[in-house]
Image (tube, coloured by chain):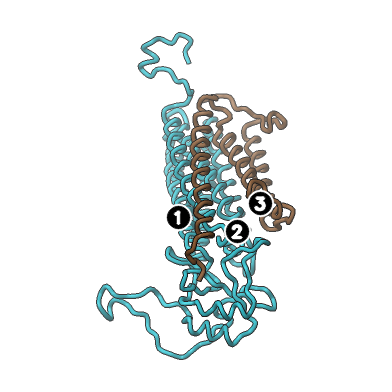
Chain colours: A cyan, B brown
Amino acid sequence: MDTTVTEENVWGGGNRPLGASYGKLMMWFFIVSDALTFSGFLASYGFSRFKFIETWPIADEVFTHVPFFHGNYPMYYVAFMTFILIMSSVTMVLAVDAGHKMMKNKAIIYMFLTIIGGAIFVGSQAWEWATFIKGDYGALETNGGRILQFVKADSGDRAALADFAKIIPGEREQHSSNVGVWFNDEPALASYTVEEVKAGFLADPNILIRTETINEEGEKTLLTREESLDRIQDAKLVVEGANLIRNEYGSRLFADFFFFITGFHGFHVFSGVVINIIIFFNIILGTYERRGHYEMVEKVGLYWHFVDLVWVFVFTFFYLV
Amino acid sequence: MAHEHKLEIFRGLLKFKSNTQKIWGVLIFLSIVTAVEVALGITKPELLTKNTLVGMKLLNWIFIVLTLVKAYYIAWDFMHLRDEKSSLRRTIVWTPIFLVCYLIFILLFEADYIYNVYKDGFVAWDF
């Protein structure tokens, strides 16, 4: 700020009390408001979770897959995604730093690495979604909308529907709108009917039912065989994977929030990558060299770090807590 | 634009020679914190899951605190809030913190109330 602040200077907007340029300040405005949007989402996730605190799905049991590997690896892949995003944040700061020093070629390389990191993250996100939507074990839904999952009594492992369901020969075709009245159709049929799962369950004494309720040890309640036989009478629907209406992991809201929050974040990453690409080409074309400063890289960098910042919170509240 | 970088983290405990070095130092720190989080999440030590503080498992408190630590270093060093004027820093940081604390307070208390309504009410939900 000038030492001789004239009245004209102050009222005309001539002084800069925050010491930041217009563009940077506006980026911070946007980031603060976007942070409040994400906070709203995460807080409403907390709201729904506290509402159903005793039956909420346990994230470790839902996100257990790593691409190209079979088996049970809770959280490793999400941790990898977090690392990728932090890493691309680092290359972004290095690009900003190179820009400050007017080192064009260094800035180009670091921007490129940042774009690659963002692309890997978005790809991983898409893979997570695909795995989540596909599901792995399958479950039954009861009349009251509760989810019943299956466990093998001897090993304690989860049992997939395919492990025990009995194939009952019969004809049941999916009803689509082109064979009847145009507004009448039904969603894709599950691999098994409720009758087939029930018959397989009755025939195999090794299968137990696991309910949504979390017991004092922090695990899902496992019913005895007698209780299971009683409980399966309530089943009315086979649920495989997840959609916006129901999912095999438990509470319906869980999948809704998963799609909404990680989707909104993934959209931010995607637009961040697009903006990074634009800046990348601008650096190559020498736009900022001619302009005399690389502040544009810094502003986009702020956005990119913000995306990383949000992911840190999503990671904690969706996968860890 | 060519303003000075502050090169100290941990309240001056660790001082770097250049901005680039500081960035790598912060990366190492953030990676260690993430690794600790994942390790705790996988092993779930009983000591931390059995004991609670204000109605929440100790483990979850640790996760939240570590998240805030990570957020601090991302904002301070990657978004270089450390180098900005304190007036800008306070505007950016305290406004959302105030609003978010308020929102969380309202929503979580309300949710707990609804949980009790479901639990003690005369309507069956599990059938």
Image mark for residue A125: none
Image mark for residue A77: 2
Tags 2 and 1 both on a single chain: yes
- For marks 2 and 1, the one nearer the N-term is 2
Residue A221 higher or lower than A268, as above or below = below
User: Please, what is the three-letter code of the amino acid marked with disc 1?
Assistant: Phe
Where residue A274 appears, as percent x and y from the top left, is: 43, 47
- Residue lying furthest bottom: A169
Q: Is residue B62 left or right of residue B108?
A: right
- Image quadrant where residue A137 sits: bottom right
Looking at the picture, tell me which residue is in the foreground, A104 or A46: A46
Looking at the picture, tell me which residue is in the foreground, A146 or A271: A146
x 56%, y 43%: residue: A89
Secondary structure category for the residue under label 2: helix
Where residue A241 appears, as percent x and y from the top left, is: 49, 69
Secondary structure category for the residue under label 3: strand
Residue A307 higher or lower than B123, as above or below = above
Image mark for residue A260: 1
What residue sits right under mark 3 in the picture? B57
Q: Mark 2 belongs to which subunit?
A: A
Looking at the picture, tell me which residue is in the foreground, A37 or A297: A37
Tags 1 and 3 both on a single chain: no
